[in-house]
Image (cartoon, rainbow, N blue to C red):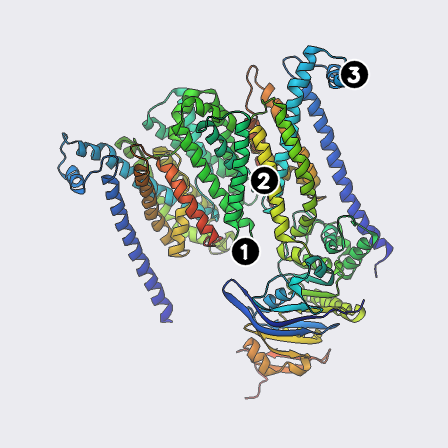
Amino acid sequence: MTAPVSDRQNKAARLTLGLLLLAGALVVIALLSLTTGARPIPPESVWQAITAYDASSTDHRIIWDLRLPRTIVGLLVGAALGLSGAVLQGATRNPLADPSILGINAGAALAVVLGVALFGMTQLSTYVWLAFIGAGLAMLIVYSVASLGREGATPIKLALAGAAITAVLQSVVSAILLTSPRTLDEVRFWQVGSLAGRSIDIVLQVSPFLVVGVLLALATARMLDGLSMGDDVARALGQRIRLSRGLAGLAAVVLAGGATAAAGPIAFVGLTVPHVARAITGPGYRWILPYSMLMAPILLLGSDILGRVISPPGEVQVGIVTAFVGAPFFIALVRRRKLAAL
Amino acid sequence: MSANHQLLAAGLDLGYGERQIVSALDLTLPAGQLTVIVGANACGKSTLLRGLARLLTPTRGAVYLDGKPIHQMPTREVATILGVLPQSPIAPDAITVTDLVGRGRYPHQGWFRRWTPEDDAAVAQALQSTDTLELADRPVDELSGGQRQRVWIAMALAQETDLLLLDEPTTFLDINHQVEVLDLLTDLVKTSGRTVVVVLHDLNLACRYADHIVAMKAGTIVTEGRPVEVITEQIVKDVFGMTSRIVVDPVSDTPMIVPIGRHHVEKLPA
Amino acid sequence: MTTALDITRVVQTRTRSADRRRNVTLALLVALLLVFALALYLGDYPVPVEGVIRSLLSPFTGLTDRGVDFIVLQVRLPRAILAVLSGASFALAGIIFQTLLRNPLASPDIIGIAHGASASAVFCIIILGWSGTAVSFGAFGGAVITALAIYLLAWRNGVTAYRVVLIGIGMAAMLAAVISYLFTRARLTEVQQAMAWLVGSLNASRPGDSIVLGGALLVLIPAMIALLRGLDAMELGDDTARSLGAKVEFTRLGLMLVAVGFAAFATAAVGPVGFVAFVSGPLARTMLNGAGRGFPQAALVGALVMLASDLIAQHLLPNTQLPVGVVTGAFGALFLLWLLMASGRSGRVN
């Protein structure tokens, strides 16, 4: 009788250690993000820039105006995307769930396109609110449509509804972009997903939502464990299915909407990171969520750093790097049969 | 149509990837008899059946049909001699019972030979034998588990093969239908001389119906032969890990296994 | 013992299915002909039925009317034919994938092949500066290479539907990133050109398009029919199929190649018009209601959807031509909504 208990304790200890290691890796990557770029800056200067800011030093200005916001946005957006994906996969019992599949990215994109086309918006800080609203509305529509009928929003119906709404929204986006070259010109840079040029305002605007989203998401961990056993079993154990899914959906939207608002649509992070997390932690969401939350920013910032160095003096945007890093990794996972059916 | 076809396995190793399930197995299936394979879960009985049915390629050894290695024979030719009902067949959406049973005629048809009266007769016979004729028009996905199982058996019957292999065909069936199916298989053996091989999980039904019983454990055959000769309390203990008493079935005169658990053991001697 | 009555019952069920198939096919053909006639009639200069017939027959009768003939024979007829051929082609690609992968969502639009064609075409337009037919070649090549890559990556002692779908989605995301990247690296005019190609268009009045596509269909359709028999067995699961004597891997690979061929040629001709592939199979099967697999009917549905969408795209708004992809997108979305509501009542999602 004692053996299982100590097994569990061992596992908890191991996983906690893992989490600490990940946090350490995150700090290292953040530091790397501050020092790397077209103009390499030594770590001592970074430290000085933070502790003894000197406005006349170019290095210090680069740190404060460009790299620090960029790194912070990367951390926040990464964590948000990773968590959002994990929560969605758990709530929909669908290993392919990703904010982009459920219409969130398409909704954000349409809102931004409309803003630019109809109201001539050009400032990123105004995009933020639009993207947020668009993401929220799209998810609401997807969820409502998927809930039609007796069984509520089952995994398959969610995927179908997501595909339908995404398609409609993308068609409208295409139509608008075709008729308004100015909008096309503005939007094609935003649509790629990038951490560059994000000022501290963005961070301040988006972070309250992201914090709320993170707390909400972490709170749904137990509910997700219940949902993963199937609706019938969950109900038998006394769980309220609609409430669980609703909360999880809300958390996912707040997180993904905020992330897309800040950085533009970034695919794949929400899709692949939870699978890697699950491969390490096993099926409990109490661990999958924090692991996803720490691994995703490592991936995102890592991709951002890579994008900065592979084609000097220019940059490759992070949305592209994550796709090129994420996709082969994902394909390798699929080949090795590491993706469980959830 | 008496069974002139011989199916046997020699030195058979079967597995999935690195996992080896069946090792160095020799088995000759007696022609014109009903053979039942029994064993605990995960002992390899389904794997063995799949290997015999050429659904799984052996890593070593071979399965011989009429003396020829089955994997070297054209699969279409094998399909006219050997019919298989695997464990989880998939029915396409909205397919009707008649259509599904009709698919069993696939090996007999070809490019230029499509639906003939013989095909219709075979389908009708198969439906009638499995008592599913009144379901002929219904979509398969609207049937109950038991009805669906009988329709699948009808499909295998429509194939009209000399050898018939069935993997746990009695799951989901009520006891009366279980007995009906086994009676039907016995008919096939007695009246048309076919060779039938069935994997069953119910040991008592196996003992009653089998002409030849094969008991497996951990990928090897523990014993085989007529149930009355080979099924002993020791064998049951070996194969299933269960203590039991063996009495004579009052209806069929075959061995009947009475399990001994922790409760309800009033009549045991001290 | 089976009686003659039993056999009759079996035969009746079989013929009832065949009858229903025939009726649905006929209904679809009639609908298609009507819409086709509409396509020849509608426009800035509506051409009455007699005019259309006269123009159609003019090569044989010699009775020509320059103006009307030009509109009917050089503008509307090629466009309508292209719509029918490409619609049918997309539809067949879709229903083959959906049947093989046992999933109504698994259409080439979604599992990466359309993205391969698009990425390749955008690359040709933006990096290589190509246009016109050259881009079509590029698109075709892109579709084929992507399909091959997906198949090879999904192959591990055989191919499973699960792996194909997932790897396809992975490739789709990667290729979408390629397109986004190219969009940021190009001049605005090039991006506009690429976008125009991406939404799909039947504007191309190059008769060459229809001829190539028609030729491809002449080869691909018989190939598909040859492989369909194997599908009878494969629909029952790989094990049952093998036990019935079907050559499972061969049939699966063959059908996938044919489906890729349909998708690639159609995309090369009209661009990646979405949703026709997705919608046609399920619509056809719903109409048949279990009376068959629906392949010929799906082709007709696809032709109908493409033709009708093009008409709507051309004539819905005064003075503006919508891209056909936008209308098919709307069709697709409406269809999905209907599916959801219908499944809501029956509790089944097919």
Give x and y (percent) for residue C289: 69, 42
Q: In this figure, which residue is indicated by the disc labeled 1?
A: C157
**Which residue is at the front of the view, C68 or A193?**
C68
**Which residue is at the front of the view, C141 or B270?**
C141
Chain letter of disc 3? C
Chain letter of disc 2? C
**Which residue is at the front of the view, C13 or B15?**
B15
Q: In terms of sequence position, does the residue under pointer 2 or pointer 3 come before the other?
A: 3
- Amino acid type indicated by mark 1: Asn
Q: In terms of sequence position, does the residue under pointer 1 or pointer 2 come before the other?
A: 1
Is the C terminus of chain B in the top left, top right, bottom left or bottom right quadrant?
bottom right
As measured in the structure, the alpha-carbon distance from the residue carrying label 1 to the one carrying label 3 is: 61 Å
**Which residue is at the front of the view, A230 or A338?**
A338
Looking at the image, residue B138 sits to the left or right of residue A57; the answer is right
Q: Secondary structure at mark 3?
A: helix
> Which residue is found at the position 79% from the left and 50% from the top?
B113
> Which residue is found at the position 30% from the left and 37% from the top?
A308
As measured in the structure, the alpha-carbon distance from the residue carrying label 1 to the one carrying label 2 is: 21 Å
> Which residue is found at the position 27% from the left and 39% from the top?
A71
Q: In this figure, which residue is indicated by the disc labeled 2?
A: C260
Disc 1: CA contacts within 10 A as few (<14), some (14-19) or many (>=20): few
Looking at the image, residue B100 sits to the left or right of residue A124; the answer is right
Looking at the image, residue C9 sits to the left or right of residue A160; the answer is right
- Amino acid type indicated by mark 2: Val
Q: Residue furthest right?
A: C4
Disc 3: CA contacts within 10 A as few (<14), some (14-19) or many (>=20): few
Disc 2: CA contacts within 10 A as few (<14), some (14-19) or many (>=20): many
Give x and y (percent) for residue A185: 40, 23
Q: Nearer the viewer, mark 2 or mark 3?
A: 3
The circle on residue C61 is 3
Do the dots labelled 2 and 3 sit on one chain?
yes
